[in-house]
Image (tube, rainbow, N blue to C red):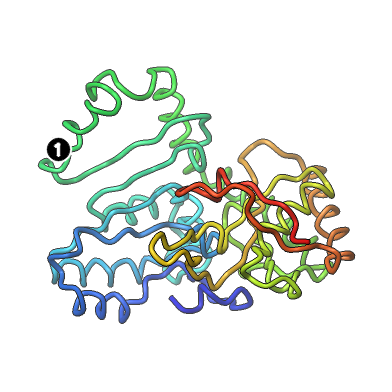
Amino acid sequence: MDEAHDPSSDHPFKGNIDLDKFQALIERVGAEKIPYICVATCVNMAGGQPLSLANLREVRKLCDIHGIKIMHDMTRVAENAFFIQQREEGYGDKTVAMITHEICSLTDGATMSAKKDAMVNIGGFLALNDDRLYEKACELVVIYEGLHTYGGMAGRDMEALSIGIRESLCDNHIRARIGQVEYLVKKLMDANVPIVRPIGGHAIFLDAKAILPHIPQEQYPAQALAAALYVESGVRTMERGIVSAGRNQETGKNHGSKLELVRMTIPRRVYTQSHMDVAAEGVISLMEKANQIRGLEFTYEPNCLRFFMGRFKAVE
């Protein structure tokens, strides 16, 4: 939705799908050309913003009319469920686990990178309601990992994941987890640091366009801010802007990105309040000399995943 591209908007569910845009896409390309729509809970590129169950139900209705499946990127579903509990009318007395179950009931399948909400060091899964698709996935996994009964994750890691899923849906855990994000947000907002509002679940997102207005987007302001923060304080963050958007291989031009964000991700059950203080102090200190930060240019740009593997230098 459009509000997702406005860091200052306080819309409680910026992760919602714009139904008019979705309908227009269906009419333009035809439903038969859309195998599925991917719905992410706590949309990472929008600042960790949640979607509402009311919106997801409307998406489900539209997909049912046109025979389109819904695939759920459920990497941060527990955090999204918590925001529904806190922000959506009618869910204040529901547990995070109950809300998560309702979210999943409205989708046809899901993918999960379990290193986030489920608190494990490795692993993830594909879940499907469709037996036919499940069988096709089992056939494909032989090529990449081995037979589905023994390929992929080790038994120890699968056991840890099963425990992590259960613990991630505990209301007390998720309340404390979001509370740590809120603590860091308050320290930054008290210092007038421009961030994406309202807070997301897994991270604080710095608004690099507002912090570095002197750096044009073609010089990658979010990447420049992330690099400067690491040099300043040793705090490692992640660019979510035009570098992440990638480049058009035919025209050579960068794909556009309305947001230039620096993601300060907080791993679960790792950091103390003192760590949050250090991170905040690093950002606040950098704000005082933000005008000294220069834009960047690539010294090495891979064809894909440049936000992971690219190398940069400061523009002269």
Image position of 212 with respect to 238: above or below: below
User: Which residue is found at the position 48% from the left and 38% from the top?
Assistant: 118
State the residue in front, 116 or 88.
116
- Disc 1 marks which amino acid? Lys
State the residue in front, 168 or 161.
161
Q: Quadrant of residue 186?
A: bottom right
Residue 85: x percent and y percent?
A: 48, 61
Residue 59: x percent and y percent?
A: 28, 69
Quadrant of the image for the C terminus? bottom right
Considering the numbered disc 1 on the image, is that residue within a helix, a strand or a loop? helix
Position of residue 299 in the picture relative to residue 215 (left or right): left
| Neighbour tally class for label 1: few under 14, some 14-19, many 20 plus, Cα within 10 Å | few
Image position of 100 with respect to 242: above or below: above
User: Which residue is found at the position 79% from the left and 43% from the top?
Assistant: 234
Tally the numbered discs.
1
Residue 107: x percent and y percent?
A: 26, 55
Position of residue 304 in the picture relative to residue 239 (left or right): left
State the residue in front, 142 or 49.
142
Quadrant of the image for the N terminus? bottom left
Position of residue 39 in the picture relative to residue 34 (left or right): right
Q: Give the labeled residue for mark 1.
A: 136
State the residue in front, 92 or 261.
261
Residue 133: x percent and y percent?
A: 15, 43
Image position of 2 with respect to 187: above or below: below
Direction left: furthest residue: 132
